[in-house]
Amino acid sequence: MTTLAARPDERTQPPVRPPKGGAKDRWVRRAPLLPALIFALIVTQIPFLYTLYLSTLSWNALRPGDRPFVGLDNYVTVLTDTRLRSALLNTVLLTAGAVVFSMILGLALALLLDRKFIGRSIVRTLLITPFLVMPIAAALLWKHAIFNPTYGLVNGIFGGSTDWVSSYPKGAVIATLVWQWTPFMMLILLAGLQSQSNDVIEAARVDGANAWQVFRRMTLPHLRQYLELGALLGSIYLVNTFDAIFSITQGGPGTATTNLPYEIYLTTFRKFEYGEASAAGVIVVILTIIAATFALRVISSLFKMEDHR
């Protein structure tokens, strides 16, 4: 009589992991990415390092042979100059206004598109269209077709001959930016709405919660991270707004709409102060990096939240 040796249950055995590759294998996998990495370093980091170097010089193009080293004096000038401080304040106001209003409208449109109705795909495509328009084209469209005091759409509807660009310059720029960036916010928030569990919402309605209570206590907390992501990404792009200001107001009247990018343009091509303009550009890059860091953290938390589901 033959006895069979008991074999251990294969299901209880730990999974066999492939051996880890050495440093050579890792470099072989990363080698195809090296040309892109080198190209990105050449295109982005070398110009930035050169800008840092220029920001330490007192260089005026009208005095080409005179470039003394001044250290951090240009940064002190940027942070203490009245015109540049006004540009910084305008940058904050224009960015915050455009982000807040586009976020509110984007949320309203996302709630609309989250419902099923006939022609929803067509409406969604039409609402996305403004985001696909080039910024300079959008600025010229709003300046001439909507805000023009003689034949503009606003005066054509409400009557009168108000010069909206001269009377309300910040509002004109913010309205243009909101029109263009609302679809971006709408797409982010619509993705958040479609990731919400319908079972939980139906259970809340069965328990007697009305539409406002569901939105305030369930939908809005669920969208918090998507709202933060939209606000941060929008701020990163809108803080560098140049097209709308250059095309609509030219920074005026006075300095009412002159933001940091436009002030850098004026400092470079009107005052020819390359060192001062470089210092202002470095400050803008630092502010953008800070906002991008928060945006990356929000994106990382969203990915972790999706992994736990």
Image: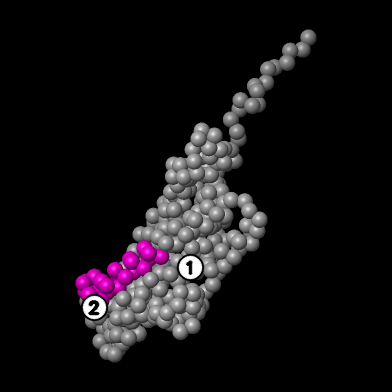
Query: Which x, y percent locates residue 213?
Result: 45, 42
Q: Which residue is mark 2?
A: 69
- SS class of the residue under badge 1? helix
Q: Nearer the viewer, mark 1 or mark 2?
A: 1
Q: Which residue is mark 1?
A: 179
Name the residue rendered at 50%, 35% in the picture: 208
64 horizontally vs 233: left or right: left
270 horizontally vs 201: left or right: left
Highlighted magenta segment, given as a residue range: 71-98
- SS class of the residue under badge 2? loop
Residue type at numbered disc 2? Phe
Whether residue 208 appears in this view of the structure is yes
Query: Which x, y percent locates residue 285?
Result: 36, 67
Between 62 and 173, the residue placed more toward the observer is 173
Query: Which x, y percent locates residue 264?
Result: 34, 77
Name the residue rendered at 21%, 72% in the picture: 80
Mark 1 vs 2, N-terminal side: 2
Residue 88 colored in magenta in the image:
yes
- Give the distance between the C-alpha atoms of the residues marked 1 and 2, in whole angstroms: 45 Å
Would you call the spot at circle 1 few (<14 residues within 10 Å), some (14-19), or many (20 or more)? some
Residue 236 colored in magenta in the image:
no
Residue with the most extreme right position:
1
264 horizontally vs 11: left or right: left
Assign the N terminus to one quadrant of the image: top right
Between 83 and 247, the residue placed more toward the observer is 247
